[in-house]
Amino acid sequence: IHDRRVLQAVKMVKRHLFVDGALKLFAYRDKPLPIGYGQTISQPYLVAYMTQAASVEPEDRVLEIGTGCGYQAAILAELASEVYTLEIIEPLARSAEERLSGLGYKNIHVKYGDGFEGWPQQAPFDVVIGTAAPREIPSKLLDQLKMGGRLIFPVGPSHTQRLVKIVKGENGFEEETLLPVAFVPMVRAQEE
């Protein structure tokens, strides 16, 4: 990770504030940790890597799919103008909203909802970033990207996921595989 703004954001956001109880002791290890409901807070390196790959600029509007505990949203909020984040598990959405508000973030908007649908009322976005892996990228998320927008997402079945970067250009979408990853699967509302 070489982007100084990303490194500064990771330094500013205290990871121990996003995990509960005894897990606080492990908050600064470079490992994912459970946050309940079968979900995890991603390892810090991967959060920073994905954020760097998204090339988030100060004026950007970002859509995050998979709020979880709110850690990735907080990192993004340090770098972007506005962060819109969706969580399919209602108790996680509510606790993340309370946590982020309590930490003073005014540029993060949390919504309980289906990530496959995105947030069309707030589109288009400069960046769409995902913290759960669908088998393939939902077309509605691609539709909500601005021209020149970047999508960073894990994709594929659990045993063969890869992190992809897709850029929306004049001639369609350009896709690049960044690295192999292992994320929780992205689920639709009826699969909860």
Image (cartoon, rainbow, N blue to C red):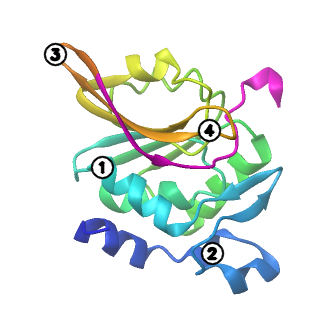
Q: Are marks 3 and 1 in contact (CB under 8 Å)?
A: no
Q: Which residue is mark 3?
A: 170
Q: Which residues are magenta?
A: 174-192
Disc 4 residue crowd, few under 14, some 14–19, many 20+, Cα 10 Å:
few
Give residue 41's position: percent from left, percent from top. Answer: 64, 60
SS at mark 1? Answer: loop
Spatial CA distance of label 2 from label 3 is 42 Å
Q: Is residue 186 magenta?
A: yes
Give residue 81's position: percent from left, percent from top. Answer: 30, 49
Spatial CA distance of label 1 from label 4 is 34 Å
Amino acid of disc 4: Thr
Badge 3 or badge 1: first in the primary sequence: 1
Q: Residue furthest left?
A: 170
Badge 2 or badge 4: first in the primary sequence: 2
Front-lying residue, 16 or 171 = 171
Q: Which residue is mark 4?
A: 160
Q: Residue furthest bottom?
A: 25
Badge 2 or badge 3: first in the primary sequence: 2
Amino acid of disc 2: Leu
Q: Residue at x 48, y 15 (%)?
A: 139
Which quadrant is the N terminus positioned in? Answer: bottom left
Q: Which residue is mark 1?
A: 81
